[in-house]
Amino acid sequence: MERKPLPAWSFSVEQCLKRYNVRLDKGLSTYEAEKRRESYGWNELSKAKGKPLWQLILDQFDDMLVKILLGAASISFILAYMHGYESDGFKAYVEPFVIVLILVLNAIVGVWQETNAERALEALKEMQSKSSKVLRDGYWVPDLPARELVPGDIVELRVGDKVPADMRVAVLKTSTFGVEQSSLTGEAMPVLKGTDPVTLDDCELQCKENMVFASTVVVNGSCICVVVSTGMSTEIGKIQKQIHEASLEESDTPLKKKLDEFGGRLTTAIGLVCLVVWLINYKNFLIWDMVDGWPANVRFSFQKCTYYFEIAVALAVAAIPEGLPAVITTCLALGTQKMAQKNAIVRKLPSVETLGCTTVICSDKTGTLTTNQMSVSEFFTLGGKTTSARVFRVQGTTYDPKDGGIVDWNCYNMDINLQAVAEICGVCNDAGIHNEGCRFRATGLPTEAALKVLVEKMGVPDAKVRNRIRETQLAASYLIDCKTVNLGTCDWWNKRSKRVATLEFDRVRKSMSVIAREPSGRNKLLVKGAVETLLERSSHVQLADGSRVPIDESCKQLLLSRLLQMSSKGLRCLGLAYKDELGELSDYYGDRHPAHKKLLDPASYSSIESDLTFVGVVGLRDPPHDEIDKAIDECRQAGIKVIVITGDNKSTAEAICREIKLFSEKEDLIGRSYTGKEFMSLSSTQQSEILEKPGGIVFSRAEPKHKQEIVRMLKEMGHIVAMTGDGVNDAPALKLADIGIAMGMNGTEVAKEASDMILADDNFSTIVSAVAEGRSIYDNMKAFIRYMISSNVGEVISIFLNAVLGIPECLIPVQLLWVNLVTDGPPATALGFNPADSDIMRRPPLKNDDALINSWVLFRYLVVGSYVGLATVGIFIMWYTQASFLGIDLVSDGHTLVELSQLRNWAECPLWSNFSVTPFVVGGGHTVAFSNPCDYFTIGKVKAMTLSLSVLVAIEMFNSLNALSEDHSLVTVPPWRNPWLLLAMAFSFGLHCLILYVPFLADIFGVVPLSLNEWLLVVLISSPVILVDEVLKLVGRTRTRRFRAKEKMA
């Protein structure tokens, strides 16, 4: 049972304890906990019931083209069963068997994809805490299973603990208590928690500074908390609901929608043509005599009726590109390999095609636009006097000490002031750096790790020491285990100034300091913290030569103006200071020192950190990736809108967006920058206007529900949305987006499982490269879809002509299946290797209403298809009726010629008098003889049928060359532009020869070997299809030029 949790963040600790009827020293009783569990349920994420397997299987057949194929297979099976006993045996069942096999394979793939889709929900469960330290019946239970927690339980949290439920902080056991909650809120830095109530009743997660949330991790300190929400009522539980809701809203890809739309039209067309073909031949199976103007003696031939019904089924089989699903899957799989080489790992094949249609990219900031590695970008100190400041620029964006350096830096010139900067940054620091493969990572707080990298770049003033450090680091680089990064400079400062005590950071004084024993034997206080608070507690400033000068108002204003300049760039600024005179702590050595009690009381820290000497300011940031501004510009040229959605504060988000050139330096951000709460408070009309406005937008302080709602609105407006993210908070939006993109290096497992694609390098630029690849793949897919459909149009027209003329079947269903599945497949797949056009990222994205096949393309298919039909049927008639063609002897095999009228009325053969035929020879020296002359039109058509099939295959090979470009001539786009296509054509022709010249296969497919003369005839009749399409392309280019000229004039 779920209950709406109380707004515990707005209560005082006493009010909260009273509401939950619990005491901090007793906790809940076992009886009360059981009673509450009956009301609130277990503290675990529930799992929504998925579709049963049988329903998943049935869903795979809910497709118009699949239904037609299923119907065709059923009818073929019935007809094969009725006539299969005669002579065909297994051969009669080949066609329905192959169709059913295709459908079963497609269904297996579909079910597998759907069962993988909900793994994100399981990954969420893995993030939950397993046990926790809980106060029950007045005693601490050290490892109570987390699922047994109920609202009102008293829980103790320590460093490293995973928070087991949403809880209100009641008592801090240490001076500070910090939680890493970036995976839930998107904040780049760990968040300090306190006990004071937050007065807002409805506030963002980031503002709930007295709350800890399930699945987040404690990074420092310890505290006592009161459980306020469990299970599905927690913030992570709400995210699970959102992921499930988003999975129910998943829609088809743009190409799938277009194919479904085309499938519906194709179904109608097939139905009408099949009916027309059947009705045209009704006189052949339904005969009657006219008596007194009325039909009498009606005679019905079931055998002939089923024969013409078989022709209609063959037409349905010919019209549907059965090989299309396999070719699309192959092309997408090849596309995933190309993208993997560019650091984009595709989890779901259709997302390759969706990428190419993307109109909006909604990007997270931390880790996608930025490196998610804090680094110092500049620092400043005073010069020779209080009115001048020295600014030092720092290059490098990672935790690698060798990445970049300080601009115009010479460590030989490190004066006393700069040495103080290095000492404070290196000694007043608890962080470390380690190496994971090719990536440097921080141990401890990211800001402190960045300060240590700065110290390494600064070096030491002593030349001998510097050389020794360099040699040590060089030797360390050759070690087998080099995970720990050698920070020689920091180590030198720490040996020189040994720490003897630490004054931990707290929220009141906003600083942290250490007492260090100097080489002189006296102690020195080294301090870092918020610049404003350090200035208030500083009485002096240090100049470049090390001299201490009293701080005056003009000096203070200079320092604050420099601070303002750095803050406006989105830098996180830290002040540095020291204190020489420590009074009773000047000789402090450890916990046995008389003044040790003073260090145990955090309230005394402010007095210790007074009368400071201010040294300088360090500016840190999470820097953008190097290529981001170029990638943003490419998106702009490609007509793709970029929206930044982050959990960070507004000023930081805006500064980063300016730096990556999403906005210009002086651009007014009114109407372009909103917090999540501000945007959601607007009316739906205002929201739509903002989202439709051209140019970039940034949303800061965004919660999971805000991200999801923005994605949903964009989709409702007709956009194809790509969404990036790395945290748990991003998972619902990743699931809802047309393509969810997770971070591979810093992304949570939840985000990865909810995504369609993973970025191996966590770089926004990789998305843009993937979009370009997706566009290329989409273009190529359209090319081979059009190629396969145009080939099928030719097959339909040939069968239609066959039926209209009343001649014997030129092609049987099993032959059509072979052409559609096998011989068409390799060229269609090879078209997926067409190189991308040079202007592919300078074209606007495809619109949802762009037709896959427009009226002009359809007209072209009909013209080319008409030629295919005429050529296929024509060579069949030619073999029966003509002795030669263009000097090629057609009767060298000894077959009998007949009149066209006889061929068209072949069914009346038994009524003909004096009709006789002679045996003829086929390849391999075999002779075809007839006991009944009328068998010449059934058994004897084997050579004519082989010629028709060969012409169809040859035409489709030549037609694949036409598909290299939709509009450009083969003169400008030569075949060798795609050598894979030439190989595929050779392979397909080889397969065709295989069924002609292998006796077992020739018997199954009803074909015979051809002679050299007959192959020459096939090529002569097939090749003109290139000329036909070249003429049509020329007309198309002329139409396009005229249309563009009219547009310019308008």
Image (cartoon, helix red, strand yellow):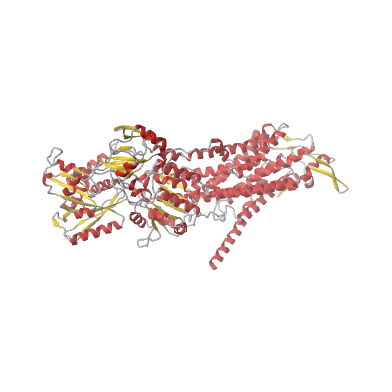
Residue 8 x/y as whole percent? 34, 45
Pick the residue in front: 16 or 264: 16
- Name the residue rendered at 16%, 47% in the picture: 525
Please, is residue 322 above or below residue 679 in the view? above
Pick the residue in front: 1013 or 819: 819
Residue extending furthest toward the right: 292
Q: Is residue 268 left or right of residue 279?
A: left
Residue 175 x/y as whole percent? 24, 43
Is residue 1030 something that shows in the picture? no
Give the quarter of the figure containing the N terminus: top left
Is residue 787 something that shows in the picture? yes
For residue 164, which quarter of the picture?
top left
Please, is residue 258 above or below residue 92 in the view? below
Residue 224 x/y as whole percent? 29, 39
For residue 469, which quarter of the picture?
top left
Residue 582 x/y as whole percent? 13, 47
Q: Is residue 490 left or right of residue 215?
A: left
Pick the residue in front: 511 or 543: 511
- Name the residue rendered at 56%, 43% in the picture: 325
Labels in figure, total: 0
